Image (cartoon, coloured by chain):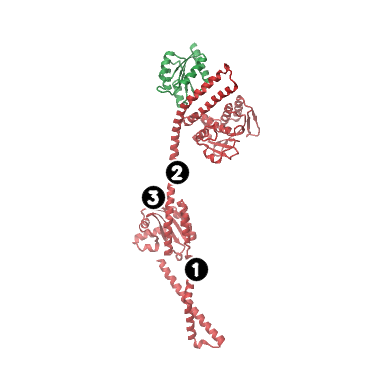
Chain colours: A green, B red
């Protein structure tokens, strides 16, 4: 169960990393869009937690590239912005969920687990 | 001319009366002497009456001055009494006119004074209308509306030009003789149309702003030159008032226009500004909030491994809850600023109200708060966006709950008004109410009287209600709770009546699922449904 966390706020990356590592996930973090793409190539995560507003390449661009290159990769948008336009754009680009900050960790963990279960069941069939 | 003739006639009459009285007096004294001589001296004066006659004439001559004066006085007070007009009223009127900021009221005041007090048969006020570029009658006394309502004079018509150049009162009788017959004809026509024998211009700083047009009751009561002079003086004084009234009206009009532009500008501007602000705040604040709340959650999730005392757990829970509240501010801002092409669907008000209250009971402690709901069926389905309606109602309900504090009653009433096709939603609370001075401000963004509140709830609600062409207002008496009333237009064509029994069933199921105990007060169709949460 490999998880990539992308957020320009290092603190957020850190506590999410420790939270998921405690729950036996293999976690890598990236603090920019560019770094996220490189990490995704090398690390091949099952699930990506992706922030939208980042300096340089933003989350929506990353989402587009990731979904094109790795269609099976699950991407959960984790963001402070929740305007309807953004939500619609993300869903159109193939985001698997859209979660707004501040996060409920229980909800987030459930969602990640769900996505992985979906992956394994579809991979098995 | 008429005045001149009249004067002459008056003078002849006066002479006639005076001479008559003198003769009568001479005869009276002569008879008196004869009577005295005959009665007391037994002497008949008829043979020698020249002396008596001379004596009488002498006596009468002595009385000539006082007699003349007496006759003049009688003349003035008895025979031509009404002609002596009390012009002091004009002075009062001129003073009063300064405080009237409305041309129509001012014109009314003037024509009525001339008509009622100064005994004119007809009086009218002609005023220049800047918007139309013509002179129109503003108000008239003694004329039928049909005679003056449609009367108008162009700015370059003969009468107006004449008034502009000569700048003095025009008297029909005098003026006509000083023009060629064509011009005189035109003028006569104007005088006829204005039902006037005398036109007094209203001049303000060399500008003709209009005229006062007067017609006396009868020729005998026509205006004298000094009177016309004082009318003109009055006109000069009052034209200042007309000028400022016109300015005031113009100002009020352009002010109104400006307000309209400003409000629409503000509205569009407000939207984008708040949207930008909200987006910025959302990002800048949500990240730190995420960190705070996230770390607190991590600690909370570790409570199985590490034994916290209750106080620490409580603190952590509060941190998570409060960060969520802070995030709600920006969420609400975003919600409002989004110009969404929202999905509209037929909505059952009862379901929305029930669901929202049920949902809320998880978050807000309704321990001692009694919620009474009344649905006055039939309520048609309302066509709109369910998220927005829920948000609007949620804000009102939350507001009521927070106003109450710990113990009290919230009453929710939904009914459909057939006469104006409106759905009315009333949310009343038994809280402290709203101070009168605060009532107009409750819908302002960021206005709040509570420390913990965002001040955006009612604002957002108002925006939603206005979006659906509805209205919202607050009714409150300080100390007696407050009621918020939303009225939303509900056209029957878009809506169907909800089948009532089913709706009721669903509603009660929702409540049971939410773990709420319910009591039903049955009392006909409009029973109060009480929800005691304990």
Q: Circle 2 sits on which residue?
A: B256
Please tell me which of labels 2 and 3 falls first in the chain.
3
**Mark 2 and mark 3: Cα distance apart in space:** 22 Å
State left or right for residue B347 relative to residue A31.
right
State left or right for residue B20 relative to residue B499.
left
Q: Residue A21 location, x and y as percent? A: 50, 15
Q: Residue at x 55, y 20 (%)?
A: B300
Please tell me how crowded label 1 is: few (under 14), some (14-19), or many (20+) other residues with Cα within 10 Å. Answer: few
1 vs 3, front mark: 1
Query: SS at mark 3?
Result: loop
Q: Circle 3 sits on which residue?
A: B133
Query: SS at mark 2?
Result: helix
The outermost residue toward the top is A124
Callout 1 touching callout 2 (CB < 8 Å): no
Comparing B496 with B231, the one in front is: B231
In this view, B423 is above or below B191: above
């Amino acid at each position: 169960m490999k998880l990539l966390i992308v957020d320009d706020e290092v603190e957020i990356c850190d506590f999410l990393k420790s939270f998921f590592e405690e729950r036996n996930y293999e976690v890598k973090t990236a603090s920019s869009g560019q770094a996220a793409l490189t990490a995704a190539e090398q690390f091949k995560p099952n699930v990506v937690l992706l922030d939208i507003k980042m300096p340089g390449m933003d989350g929506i661009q990353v989402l587009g590239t990731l979904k094109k290159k790795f269609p099976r990769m699950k991407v959960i948008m984790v963001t402070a912005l929740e305007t309807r336009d953004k939500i619609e754009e993300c869903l159109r680009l193939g985001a698997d969920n859209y979660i707004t900050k501040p996060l409920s960790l229980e909800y987030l963990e459930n969602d990640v687990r769900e996505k992985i279960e979906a992956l394994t069941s579809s991979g098995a069939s | 001319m008429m005045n001149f003739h009249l004067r002459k006639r008056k003078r002849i009459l006066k002479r006639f009366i005076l001479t008559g009285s003198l003769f009568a007096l001479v005869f009276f004294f002569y008879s008196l002497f004869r009577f005295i001589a005959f009665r007391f001296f037994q002497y008949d004066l008829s043979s020698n009456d020249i002396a008596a006659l001379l004596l009488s004439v002498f006596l009468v001559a002595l009385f000539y001055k006082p007699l003349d004066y007496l006759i003049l006085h009688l003349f003035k007070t008895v025979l031509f009494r009404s002609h002596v007009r009390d012009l002091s009223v004009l002075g009062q009127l001129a003073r009063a006119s300064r405080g009237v900021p409305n041309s129509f009221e001012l014109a009314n005041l003037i024509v009525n004074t001339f008509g009622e007090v100064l005994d004119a048969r007809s009086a009218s006020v002609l005023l220049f209308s800047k918007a139309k570029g013509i002179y129109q009658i503003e108000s008239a006394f003694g004329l039928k509306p049909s005679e003056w309502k449609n009367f108008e004079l162009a700015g370059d018509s003969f009468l107006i030009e004449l008034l502009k150049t000569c700048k003095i009162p025009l008297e029909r009788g005098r003026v006509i003789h000083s023009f060629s017959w064509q011009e005189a004809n035109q003028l006569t026509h104007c005088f006829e149309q204005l039902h006037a024998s005398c036109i007094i211009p209203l001049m303000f700083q060399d500008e003709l702003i209009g005229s006062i047009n007067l017609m006396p009751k009868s020729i005998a009561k026509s205006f004298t030159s000094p009177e016309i002079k004082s009318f003109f003086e009055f006109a000069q004084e009052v034209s200042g008032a007309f000028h400022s009234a016109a300015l005031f009206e113009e100002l009020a009009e352009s002010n109104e226009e400006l307000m309209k532009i400003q409000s629409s500008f503000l509205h569009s501007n407000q939207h984008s500004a708040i949207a930008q602000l909200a987006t910025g705040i959302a990002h800048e604040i949500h990240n730190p909030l995420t960190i705070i709340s996230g770390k607190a959650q991590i600690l909370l999730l570790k409570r199985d491994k590490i034994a916290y005392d209750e106080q620490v757990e409580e603190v952590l829970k509060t941190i998570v809850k409060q960060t969520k509240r802070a995030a709600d501010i920006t969420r609400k801002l975003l919600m409002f600023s989004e110009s969404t092409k929202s999905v509209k669907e037929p909505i059952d008000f009862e379901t929305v109200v029930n669901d929202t209250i049920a949902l809320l009971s998880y978050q807000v402690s309704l321990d001692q708060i009694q919620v009474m709901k009344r649905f006055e069926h039939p309520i048609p389905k309302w066509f709109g966006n369910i998220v927005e309606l829920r948000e609007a109602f949620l804000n009102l309900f939350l507001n009521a709950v927070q106003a109450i504090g710990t113990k009290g009653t919230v009453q929710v009433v939904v009914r459909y008004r057939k006469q104006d096709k409106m759905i009315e939603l009333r949310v009343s609370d038994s809280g402290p109410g709203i101070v009168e001075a605060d009532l107009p401000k409750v819908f302002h963004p960021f206005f709040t009287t509570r420390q913990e509140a965002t001040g955006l709830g009612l604002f957002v609600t108002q925006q939603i209600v206005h979006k659906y062409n509805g209205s919202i207002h607050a009714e409150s008496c300080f100390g007696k709770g407050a009621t918020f009333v939303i009225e939303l237009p509900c056209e029957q064509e878009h809506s169907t009546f909800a089948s009532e029994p089913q709706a009721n069933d669903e509603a009660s199921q929702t409540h049971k699922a939410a773990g709420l105990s319910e009591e039903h007060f049955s009392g006909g169709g409009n029973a109060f449904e009480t929800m005691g949460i304990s």
